Amino acid sequence: MSMMGEFKSFAIKGNVMDLAVAVIIGAAFGKIVESLVQDLIMPVVGTIFGGLDFSNYYLPLHGQGTQLALVEAKKAGAVLAYGNFLTILINFVILAFIIFQMVRIANKTQKPKVEAAPVTPEDVILLREIRDALKNRP
């Protein structure tokens, strides 16, 4: 089979299409969670800690102070943007918790798989019938 034929066979499998849909929905869901964290949660957390904006927390690596906004500080030199990292970390924790809950609920709603009893081969059944017939013979 040619490489193009193999690719077509791979691409039209149901699992690949399901994965593509899941990635697209996951990206959209990630944006929703990102907005939730940046627009709703972090302002509340910032207010609790005295009205601070975590996205502008950084440590300059070039010796200047932290009076500049993060964007300006990055232009001036290298910085450790730990406030931005904190925001992304909270975003990840919330997203991971929501996905965990979704998987947990999905697992609870699935019916447990009942394994069928193994089917006895026909020749074994026939041999048992012969054995039983020989036992009952006078």
Image (tube, rainbow, N blue to C red):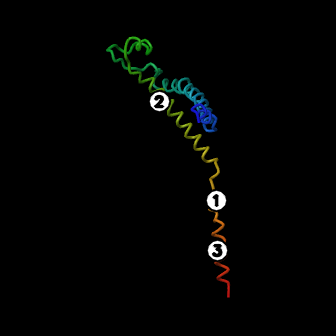
- Name the residue nearer the viewer: 133 or 65: 133
- Identify the residue under disc 1: 116
Residue 119 x, y percent position in the rendering: 64, 63
Examine the rendered structure and indicate whether residue 10 appears above or below residue 119: above
- Name the residue nearer the viewer: 107 or 130: 130
Report the number of numbered marks: 3
Q: Residues within 10 Å of mark 2 (few under 14, many from 20)?
A: few
| Distance in Å between CA atoms under marks 1 and 2 | 46 Å
Instruction: Give yes or no for contact between labels 3 and 1 (Cβ–Cβ under 8 Å).
Output: no
Amino acid at the residue labelled 3: Arg
Outermost residue, front direction? Answer: 1
Label annotation for residue 89 = 2
Q: Dividing the picture into quarters, in which one does residue 135 lie?
A: bottom right
**Quadrant location of the C terminus?**
bottom right
- Name the residue nearer the viewer: 45 or 90: 90
Residue at disc 2, secondary structure: helix
Q: Is residue 14 left or right of residue 67?
A: right
- Identify the residue under disc 3: 128
Q: Residues within 10 Å of mark 3 (few under 14, many from 20)?
A: few
| Distance in Å between CA atoms under marks 2 and 3 | 66 Å
